[in-house]
Amino acid sequence: MSQIGIHGVIQARPNVYRHMRPSPLLHHPLLSESLGFECHVKHENHNPTGAFKIRGGLNFMAGFAEAQPGRGIISATRGNHGQSLAMASRLYGVSCTIVVPMGNNPEKNNAIRSHGAHLIEFGKDFDEARIHATQLQHEQGFYYVSPGNEVPLIHGVGTYALEIFEVLPNVDGIIVPLGGGSGVCGVLAVAQAINPKVEVYAVQAENAPCIYLSWKMGEMVETATSVTFADGLATRVPFELPFEYLKNRVTEIVLVSEEEIRRAVLAMWQCTHNLPEGAGAASLAAAFKLQHRLTGKKVVLVLSGGNVDVGTLRWVLNPI
């Protein structure tokens, strides 16, 4: 797994910053008061697509467009990864097809289409959509971009971790939502190179715990379902590359319930006036569970995305 590392993250920066700026890292006193430690939020919801994934898409596409001119790509997503590839493909003139599960976030679907990508709806969940995308890859000659097993994606999203250390070099801990694993691996690659003492916590939904179970068992474990309103965390099958990288490096993987995530969405809005999607609020949900361990420390919560749809927001505000 030596192919993942800080040098790749550093090399990704020109590809990322050609099209976006560093995201804010802000100290929020109300959150700090509620949690009992110095809380900073990395606002990846301020990025062009409203999520951290755009960094990976920009880095991947910069290399792909040069290496395989004229070839199209295909991938599967619950939304943010698809938006990332769709935007990056448009910028580099690459044909892009994205597969999403039936009933996917309609606003994320529309955002993907707005960048000119061809959208296909297939399957009951992300993993069925992923399998369909790999089948279409062979049938139509696309390059399949794995949401988790592409090193350039990991190095691209790792640029936000470098930004954290530049603004807050004495950070003690970082809490990162965990879906496919690219974000956690990017943070780990940077933290281990700059300060291995920094604790990196990953967060999964209780209803989609495949990587947590795999981490506990020491081998990849699939789950039968992944039904969570935090669609960025909704995976049933771990990706091999990120799992192998994070399994002996992450400090801990924390599970959070649907109600804990829902309350964290509201708390983030009340304390910062930023509206996270479910996955984006998972870091705060975990922070409340870890607060006694983190007392007196400087901790960064990664708000990984803010693409919550109106229907989900209504439920968050009135879950009855």
Image: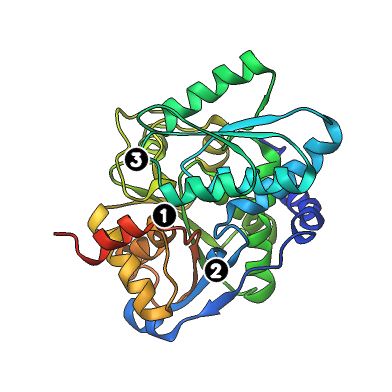
Which comes sooner in the sequence, label 3 or label 1? Answer: 3
Residue where numbered disc 3 is placed = 209
Residue where numbered disc 2 is placed = 42
Q: Position of residue 316 (x, y in %)?
A: 27, 62
- Choose between 98 and 144: the one closer to the eye: 98
Q: Position of residue 319 (x, y in %)?
A: 19, 60
Amino acid beneath label 1:
Ala
Q: Secondary structure at mark 3?
A: loop
Q: Is residue 10 left or right of residue 111?
A: right
Amino acid beneath label 3:
Pro
Residue reaching furthest to the top: 139
Q: Secondary structure at mark 1?
A: helix
Mark 1 and mark 2 residues within 8 Å of each other at the beta carbon? no
Work out which quarter of the rendered image holds the C terminus and state it. Answer: bottom left
Task: Please tell me which residue is depicted at 66% across the width and 43% down the height of the picture.
Answer: 153
Amino acid beneath label 2:
Lys
As drawn, 194 above or below 214: below
Residue where numbered disc 1 is placed = 279
